[in-house]
Image (cartoon, rainbow, N blue to C red):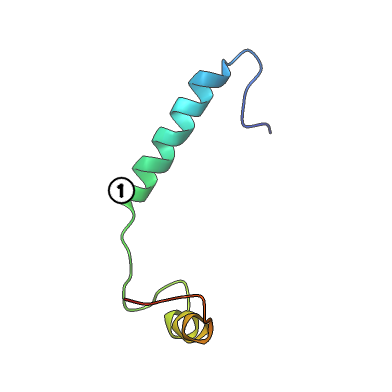
């Protein structure tokens, strides 16, 4: 099923698409104790990269 329906103006689709994305992000509750990304591993990789400077 296509995202844009036949006859639907692209601007209308884009406006409603981004509004749904914003609403979803604002209503989402973040579980800080169990993050989706492994933060310890990310920090380790960042520390190993000489081009990254952590302030």
Return the residue nearer the eye: 32 or 48.
48
Q: Is residue 43 above or below residue 20?
A: below
Q: Left or right: where does residue 42 sit relative to residue 4?
A: left
User: Could you tell me which residue is drawn at 45 percent across and 28 percent down?
Assistant: 16
Q: Left or right: where does residue 28 sit relative to residue 9?
A: left
User: Could you tell me which residue is drawn at 52 percent across and 24 percent down?
Assistant: 13
Quarter of the figure that contains the N terminus: top right
Q: Position of residue 42 (x, y in %)?
A: 48, 79
Q: Where is residue 31 in the image (x, y as percent from the top left)?
A: 33, 70
View extreme (top): residue:
7
Q: Position of residue 38 (x, y in %)?
A: 47, 80
Q: Is residue 33 above or below residue 22?
A: below
Q: How crowded is mark 1: few (under 14 residues within 10 Å), some or many (20 or more)?
A: few
User: Could you tell me which residue is drawn at 35 percent across and 41 percent down?
Assistant: 23
Return the residue nearer the eye: 50 or 40.
50
Q: Position of residue 49 (x, y in %)?
A: 53, 81
Q: Left or right: where does residue 49 sit relative to residue 5?
A: left
- The residue tagged 1 is 26
Q: In this view, does 6 lie above or below 2?
A: above
Quarter of the figure that contains the C terminus: bottom left
Q: Is residue 27 above or below residue 11?
A: below
Marker count (numbered) = 1
Task: Look at the numbered disc 1 and give the secondary structure of its residue.
Answer: helix
């Amino acid at each position: 099923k296509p995202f844009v329906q036949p006859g639907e103006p692209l601007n209308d689709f884009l406006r409603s698409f981004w509004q749904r994305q914003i609403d979803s992000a604002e209503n989402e509750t973040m579980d800080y104790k169990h993050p989706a990304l492994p933060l310890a591993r990310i920090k380790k990789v960042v520390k190993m990269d000489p081009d990254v400077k952590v302030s």
